[in-house]
Structure formats: C-alpha cells, structure tokens
Image (spheres, rainbow, N blue to C red):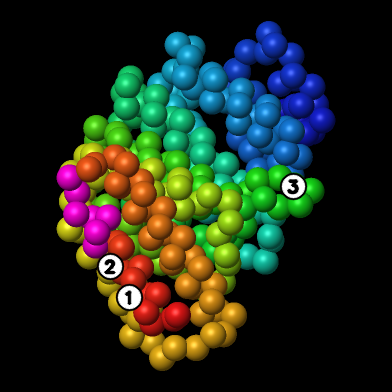
Amino acid sequence: MDVTEQQLKVQLQQEDTIISEELLDQTLHHIGSLDPVLRDDLIFSRLAEWIMSGEFTVTSAKRIVSFVLSPDGLFYKMKTSDDTAVFTRSFSALLLAVVLEKDAAHPQLEEQTYEQISNQLLEYLSNETDFRGFVPDYGWAHSIAHIADAYDAWFKHPRCQVRNEQAAIARFIEILMTPDYVFIDEEQERVITAWLAARERGMTDEILFTTIETSVQALLDLPVNWSDERFTVLRNTKQLLRTLYFRVKWQDKTSILPEQIEHLLLQIHQRYQ
C-alpha cells in the first residue's frame, strides 16, 4: 500500500520502527523527496543505519541494488527537463555507497552484480549533467559528491578491478573542468577521496597524472580568451589541481605527483596571467 510522505515521515520518526520489506519499498519510492528532513534525516539516515546493522539481509541488499541500478534510481528521469529528479538519482548513489561498504565487509551480492555495478556507475557518471550542490528550499542535491562517495566505496571493494576504472577517472576530470557550473561545495574533495582510494588499490600515479594532463593540455592549447565559460573552466581546473596537490602531498611524501601537478598549475598561470 502506498503511503504519503507525511505518513512515511511519522513512521520513520518512531524509534521502534522496524524496516520491513514493505517499508523498504516505501522509502525507496520516496528517496528523492523534496522534503530535506524526510530525505536526508529520515529516509537516508534510517536506511544507512539499518544497512550497517546485523538485521540487514541478502534479500534486502539485492532489492536495494536492483532499485539503484534501475530507471527508478540512478537513471530516474535522466535527460528530462525535470530539475528535481536529480535528488532521486543522487540519493540512490549515496545509498549504493552504504550497501557497497557493508558488502565489502560481509559479502551479500552475487558475483555478476559487481560487473553490473561497475558498468552502471560509469553509465550514470557519463550521463549526469545536473551538478548543483545546495538547492534553495530543497537542500543538498550534490550529485557529484554522492557519486564520488559511491566510487570511493566501490574502489575499496575487494571485487572492484581498479585498473579497469580509468574511464571513470577521466569522466570525473571532465566534469570537474566543466564550463557549465562553478563547483563551490567541496565536490573536488569528495572526488579526490575516491581517487586516493583507487590509488591505494593499484591505480598508478602515472595513469592518474596522464589522464589529468591530457585534459589540462587541451585547455592550454586553446587560444586565450576571458569569456565567462573559459573563466569557469579555469576556476574549476585550478581548484581541482590545488586540491589534488595537497591531498597527495599529505598522504605520500615520496610521490612526484605533487611536483607534476605544480608544473601544470604553473603552465596555466603563465598562459592566463
């Protein structure tokens, strides 16, 4: 039986509420609610707590992953004019991050599901275009931060073949250098946290730097202009490089990656001073 958002809010506010199969379906149905209290504080928080508990079952894990990878989850109204659909997509990604974290410690998913997760995450990342962080009245959409969290959990997962995930790294770079949106809500930090997880699992600095350098070089090869779009690209690119510089430098004193990043920043400065 379908319930209204107000009915679901009242139910989830009760501390003794047990997540049944029926209640799970109701929370998934409303996961992109435009009510930030219901979406963030109740649906996501209660589900995350339950997933990490001993009450979470294989059946429920499969149900959530099936939802997340469906047109009702990560791909909900993708490429439509509905500018509120991003909340469903974004919080589906965030919920998947929790399931992957739990599954890494206590495997519950079937082997073929992991390849599907890898493919569908990349498909989502390749198609998402709503990069807004905080949305007035509705709260945090934060799609790039949330999919970065999902990738952070995925890169740490024992079933993830990190060396096969270079396309995801390249797409993150493309997004974070976009001319369409200025990232102001720490998205770079969340993405780089995922990159560093991949680095710890075997993604080499050479692969990471080459992927970044290719994108930055394409920018440097363009004729200099100070259009709004170019200025947005410059702001986003420099913030990405600065963030990566310090995160790697703090983590690994022996890496030459910070020096290479510094050289890219110098080239940008010389080109656009």
Identify whether 219 is placed above or below 121.
below
Residue 80 locus on image (x, y percent):
63, 65
- Is disc 1 surrounded by few (<14), some (14 to 19) or many (20+) residues within 10 Å? some
Residue 115 appears in the rendering: no
Residue 131 percent coordinates (x, y): 57, 59
For mark 2, what is the residue? 263
Judge whether residue 259 is colored magenta.
Answer: yes
Identify the residue under disc 3. 138
Looking at the rendering, in which quadrant would you find the C terminus?
bottom left
Spatial CA distance of label 2 from label 1 is 6 Å
Tell me the CA gap for discs 1 and 3: 40 Å
Q: Is residue 264 left or right of residue 149?
A: left
- Name the foreground residue: 268 vs 31: 268
- All told, the count of numbered labels is 3
Q: Mark 1 points at which residue?
A: 267
Pointer 2: residues within 10 angstroms few (<14), some, or many (20+)? few
